[in-house]
Amino acid sequence: MSKVCIVIPFYNEANRVDLSAFSDFLHQHADFSLILVDDGSSDNTHALLKESQNSIPERIQVLSLAQNSGKAEAVRQGILKAMQWQDFEILGYMDADLATPLEEALYLTSFFEDSSFQMIIGSRVKLFGWNIQRSLKRHYFGRVFATYVSNLFNLEIYDTQCGAKFFRSEIAADLFESEFVSKWFFDIELFLRLRKEMGNELFAKSLKEVPLRNWIEKGESKLQLGDFLSTPIELSRIRNRYR
């Protein structure tokens, strides 16, 4: 089994962070480590994350950002720290609410057994027997958004925004080297960077989209109305950057 580091960004999560889930997962899976990124929280998040680190310091690191920078930069800084911390073969990120359970990381990273894959992404596809729980409002918004993004950027990806993605460390070094244009839609930038790095033909062979077996919506999205209204501007900036 390859050594894997999962980056998890947090912003004001003190009321819903499940510390036991992290320690339980690590105790059961010796090849995994965590970097918990406090993205400038104003509540007690940092203290709780440090408590988690102190429980398993050799497998959990806490990175504290001085001010709230958004998910994109929090994840990027976490990936960069992971590359400095240990020699991991696989790097990835997941959401703090654990809508995607940590156990799904085992499932997703198993696809790296195929040596051609450089990037594995989770996808919230509701299949028979799969436990995907999502409100109709978010489901339909997600489908409209994904279809628009697919056409705009010529990306045949069903779910660009699922917060569970993993990379071989070599390609991660290139994908996360520079800052992202968008705070929330940086996932799209990752696909575009990978395509630029690999070329169109190898890009199709290097990325694997995997339907998640379990995903449970946890509360409301942290995107505010202003974030939704600025979506066309954000996507336009991404398109201009990666022409």
Image: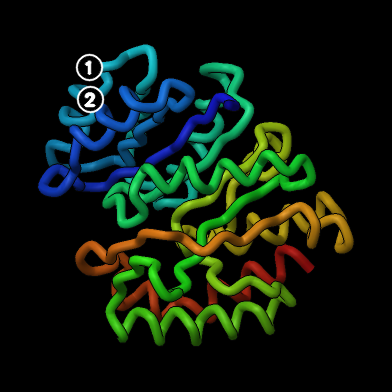
Disc 2 designates what residue?
Answer: 52
Residue count near mark 1 (Cα–Cα under 10 Å), binned few <14, some 14–19, many ≥20: few
Q: Is residue 221 above or below residue 67?
A: below
- Image quarter where the N terminus lies is top right
Comparing 53 with 223, the one in front is 53
- Asked if disc 2 and disc 1 are in contact, CB closer than 8 Å, the reply is yes
User: Image point 51% across, 26% down: which residue?
Assistant: 81
Image coordinates of residue 171 in percent, x first then y, are 72, 39
Image coordinates of residue 214 in percent, x first then y, are 36, 59
Element class at badge 2: helix
Disc 1 designates what residue?
Answer: 55
Question: Disc 2 versus disc 1: distance between alpha carbons?
Answer: 5 Å
- Image quarter where the C terminus lies is bottom right
Element class at badge 1: helix
Image coordinates of residue 111 in percent, x first then y, are 63, 46
Is residue 26 left or right of 203 when viewed as pictured? left
Q: What amino acid is found at the position of numbered circle 2 in the picture?
A: Ser
Image coordinates of residue 58 in percent, x first then y, are 38, 12
Residue count near mark 2 (Cα–Cα under 10 Å), binned few <14, some 14–19, many ≥20: many
- Disc on res. 39: none
User: Image point 57% across, 56% down: which residue?
Assistant: 121
Is residue 131 left or right of 20 when viewed as pictured? right
Q: What amino acid is found at the position of numbered circle 1 in the picture?
A: Ser
